[in-house]
């Protein structure tokens, strides 16, 4: 409005100048120019332009930011408290799945990307709500005054006022709203994926630690067996073949132990990456140990598995929002069949004549009725519908497969736990026989070795069960109680 009033003031000044043109033609030109140049700075100031500010990306600053991530900081502790973590549990003594998930939610850059995309979608929603701005048109002319006109000057001013028809603005807002909601759900989707990755990485690290412990015990027993055979060979009570067999087994176990020890740093790096923390910081944090127990009761999946998956899955909801956006786009293309109108009131001063005008214009969309764009939008909606159906089929299949794997892993763990218990009882019987002098120390060592192997099988079955449970959680995108298997 300020700009319009300013231009009207300029026009009034010019009109007054042209009315006195017959008295002093050269003076009119000078006054016109002076008025125009005097008002031009005021016109530019009233526009209120924003200035461009450069924001270069510095790799050094980003690298320092990554290295300075600290889960012991006051900001992270406040983040934990804001999300229900009890203040008396701070500082954290053991970092489990929940604590490391909070780290990922606070430190991982993937969430920053998702949030930035969400903010961009919200900005697009505000942009879609904007109404088309009026347009100012003006012209200025000067003739040679050959026909002895009242004034050699002609100038005019008109305003183009656009009017959208068929509710197009509301449809654009609807489309942008669905895309904004989809971007918001993408933030939650990224957060859940981080939680799933953190849990699986921690389980793999815990299983690797268990294997290192059990392989160390197995290595000690094979070393004891090799020592016994070496002593017996020196006494002539054993053959070199028996010693060679035991030595080969010792070398095999030692190689496995070294491989797991070397893999520890790789698994820690993987866990640090998913937690959003630098490796050097994660190495100093006390991670939770996985002390497996025999399963007395393991919670099974929900009765209506498919309904739970379709209700909780974020990608299902995102796909629905994208389908709704495709429908809104189709509605917009259909609405574009009806042309928008532009009303153009104006005023002109032409060589002494004062002319008022009112114009009306619009695109001739009634000729082709926007058929091609409507057909394209229809096909896009069909694509979204097909993608949603395929996604729903995938979700149901993933849930059924994960539930089957969980049942299988539970059965394997129960079997291995039974075998391990039987082996423990056998070891106790053999220890009593050794005390009674019925067997020698080599035979008891072999029995203890069998018990360690049985314990390794239990650890493997327990890891497979936790992995299957994590896969079911990911298929349902809903945490399940794990207290029964821990």
Image: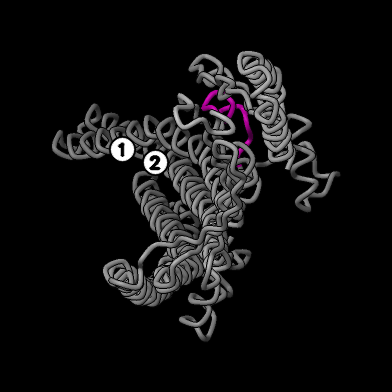
Q: Nearer the viewer, residue 358 or 154?
A: 154
Q: Residue at x 48, y 64 (%)?
A: 340
Q: Along the horizontal axis of the image, is 117 left or right of 251?
A: right
Residue holding disc 1: 256
Which residue reaches farthest right? 88
Please check the rendered image and state whether residue 279 is part of the magenta-colored stretch, yes or no. Answer: yes
Q: Eyeballing the image, is 244 above or below 472? A: above
Q: Nearer the viewer, residue 276 or 186?
A: 186
Q: Residue at x 57, y 75 (%)?
A: 299
Residue 335: percent from the left, percent from the top?
45, 72
Q: Eyeballing the image, is 429 above or below 388? A: above
Residue 166: percent from the left, percent from the top?
51, 73
Which badge, 1 or 2, is on the more N-terminal residue?
Answer: 2
**Mark 2 secondary-structure assignment:** helix
Looking at the rendering, which quadrant does residue 5 occupy?
Answer: top right
Q: Along the horizontal axis of the image, is 23 left or right of 299?
A: right
Q: Eyeballing the image, is 418 above or below 246? A: below
**Mark 1 secondary-structure assignment:** helix
Q: Eyeballing the image, is 287 above or below 56? A: below
Residue holding disc 2: 215
Residue 342: percent from the left, percent from the top?
52, 59
């Amino acid at each position: 409005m300020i700009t319009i009033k300013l231009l009207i003031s300029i026009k009034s000044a010019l009109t007054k100048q042209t009315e006195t043109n017959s008295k002093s033609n050269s003076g009119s030109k000078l006054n016109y120019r002076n008025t125009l140049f005097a008002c031009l700075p005021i016109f530019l100031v009233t526009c209120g332009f924003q200035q461009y500010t450069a924001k270069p990306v510095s790799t050094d600053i980003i690298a320092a930011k990554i290295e300075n991530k600290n889960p012991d900081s006051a900001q992270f502790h406040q983040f934990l408290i804001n999300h229900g973590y009890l203040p008396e549990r701070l500082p954290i003594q053991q970092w489990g799945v929940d604590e490391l998930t909070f780290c990922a939610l606070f430190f991982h850059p993937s969430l920053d990307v998702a949030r930035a995309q969400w903010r961009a979608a919200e900005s697009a929603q505000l942009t879609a709500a904007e109404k088309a701005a009026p347009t100012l048109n003006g012209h200025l002319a000067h003739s040679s005054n050959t026909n002895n006109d009242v004034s050699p000057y002609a100038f005019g001013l008109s305003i183009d006022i656009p009017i959208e028809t068929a509710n197009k603005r509301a449809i654009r807002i609807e489309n942008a709203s669905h895309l904004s909601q989809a971007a918001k759900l993408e933030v939650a989707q990224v957060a859940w994926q981080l939680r799933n990755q953190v849990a699986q990485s921690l389980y793999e690290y815990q299983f690797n630690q268990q294997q290192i412990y059990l392989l160390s015990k197995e290595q000690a027993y094979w070393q004891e067996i090799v020592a016994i055979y070496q002593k017996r060979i020196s006494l002539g009570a054993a053959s070199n073949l028996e010693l060679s067999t035991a030595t080969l087994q010792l070398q095999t176990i030692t190689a496995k132990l070294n491989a797991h020890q070397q893999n520890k740093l790789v698994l820690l790096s993987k866990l640090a990456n998913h937690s959003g923390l630098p490796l050097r910081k994660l190495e100093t944090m006390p991670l939770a140990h996985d002390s497996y127990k025999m399963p007395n009761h393991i919670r099974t999946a929900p009765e209506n598995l498919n309904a739970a998956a379709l209700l909780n899955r974020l990608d299902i909801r995102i796909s629905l929002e994208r389908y709704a956006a495709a429908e809104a786009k189709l509605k917009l293309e259909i609405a574009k069949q009806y042309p928008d109108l532009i009303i153009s009131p104006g005023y002109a001063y032409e060589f002494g004549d004062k002319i008022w005008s009112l114009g009306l214009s619009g695109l001739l969309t009634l000729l082709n009725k926007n058929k091609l764009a409507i057909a394209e939008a229809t096909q896009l909606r069909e694509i979204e519908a097909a993608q949603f159906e395929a996604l729903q089929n995938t979700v149901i299949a993933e849930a059924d497969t994960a539930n089957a794997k969980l049942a299988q892993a539970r059965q394997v763990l129960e079997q291995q736990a039974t075998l391990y218990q039987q082996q423990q009882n056998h070891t106790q019987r053999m220890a009593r026989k050794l005390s009674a002098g019925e067997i020698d120390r080599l035979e008891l060592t072999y029995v203890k070795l069998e018990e360690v192997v049985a314990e390794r099988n239990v650890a493997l079955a327990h890891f497979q069960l936790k992995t299957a449970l994590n896969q079911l959680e990911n298929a349902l995108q809903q945490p399940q109680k794990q207290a029964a298997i821990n």
